Image: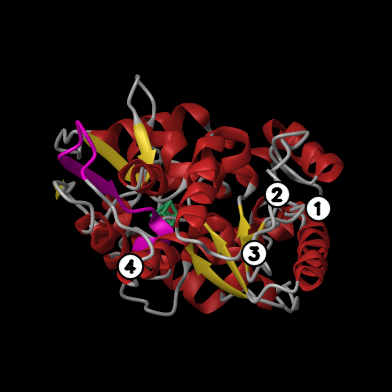
Amino acid sequence: MAEIDLKNLLNCALCANMCRCECPVTQVFSREAVSPAGKARLAYLLLEGKLDWTEDNYAALSTCVGCKGCETLCPFLELELDKELQKVKGEGASQNFNLEVLDPYRANLKNYSSPYGMKQDIPKVQKGDGEIVFFSGCTSLANNPNSIKATLSLLDKAGVSYQTINEDCCGYPAEIWGEPELARQLADENCKRLAESGASCLVTNCPECWLTFKKKYAEWGVELPVNVKDSTTYLLELIESGKLQPKEVEGINTVTYHDPCIWARVEENIEAPRQLLAQIPGVELDEAEPAGANSRCCGGGQMFQLTFPQEAEAIALRRLQEFPGASALVTTCPFCRESLKIEGNEVLELVELLDMACK
Ligand code: SF4
Ligand code: SF4
């Protein structure tokens, strides 16, 4: 297990905790124990043996959506509290603590290589020499197959040489649920199929898949045999090279774009979606407040909807109040879409809007 940054965990435990106002979890639980410094205090005392591991302590450590809102106000630049909490949770998992609510999802992951159970088949496609692999991700497969259809349709329209593979979950849920060996096993299986595909680049709509392939595989000691690109950047390149030519979409003239936390604060990818939206004639951006790097979590981070569904919904409702009421609400993450489409809200993934514009 990666080494825990005890020094910064103690700094955090002793901090004035002003960042709690940017922590969506603290806002909805209203409990000091789940605030950033509260969790750091708990983590530090558990590691020092001053507190015993209990189900409650493990659950309190699990109340982090990984949004990095706390980092926007944090004076300790090297501290990544979400990552440290993940490592401390690993200690708890090694003593057989986990969240019971996740048992069925964990079993699905082991039995079907997807947390959602038996996977729907991804359409098997091979166009040309299949230079690009489009990786759907299990959350899109389970919850929004239309986003997959839209992406494949855009690749077809642009005349791209691409393929799909028999994909397993990227391994992200296994890691956050304290199953590092399973995460590694899924990674190995995906890498084997990617190597067999002969492709040079993997494109995905899912920021969590992107992060896992791009950064986590290396941390797990797994060598990915292809480059990785997020679909927004890739599709923007196709538009700029004239291979896709978006037109007006009837009924959509103002769009609010919700930045997923990974694109806002983990790997800055704020401009590409806005540049892509600017390429759709007749569409004006009506920004949320806050937006971009200061965007707030919708409650979907670290699969919070599965672990704490009521609180995840409360976080989503808070985020929805920050939107101005444009004719379309658009995001670039299947987890964000799932979180925000409560109360009858229609939420589009950017690929769906672009496909409508390229009809
Ligand atoms: S995350 Fe940073 S700002 Fe927030 S309580 Fe910890 S040390 Fe303080
Ligand atoms: S990463 Fe987000 S949810 Fe986790 S402690 Fe920081 S602000 Fe709270």
Looking at the image, which is closer to me, 218 or 47?
A: 218
> How far is disc 4 from disc 3 in space, using C-alphas?
46 Å
Please report the residue visible at 70 percent of the width from the left and 57 percent of the height from the top: 171
Q: Residues within 10 Å of mark 2 (few under 14, many from 20)?
A: some
- Closer to the chain start, of discs 4 and 3, is 3
> How far is disc 2 from disc 1 in space, using C-alphas?
9 Å
Q: State which quarter of the image contains the N terminus.
A: bottom right
Residue corresponding to mark 1: 95
The location of residue 40, given as percent across then percent down, is: 49, 60
Camera-near label (3 vs 1) is: 3
Circle 2/circle 1 CB separation < 8 Å: yes
The location of residue 159, given as percent across then percent down, is: 50, 61
Camera-near label (2 vs 1) is: 1
Circle 3/circle 2 CB separation < 8 Å: no
Residue corresponding to mark 3: 87
Name the side, left or right, on which 261 lies relative to 82.
left
- Determine which of the numbered discs, if any, sits on residue 53 in the image: 2
> How far is disc 4 from disc 1 in space, using C-alphas?
56 Å
The location of residue 344, given as percent across then percent down, is: 35, 20
Residue corresponding to mark 4: 242
> How far is disc 3 from disc 1 in space, using C-alphas?
13 Å
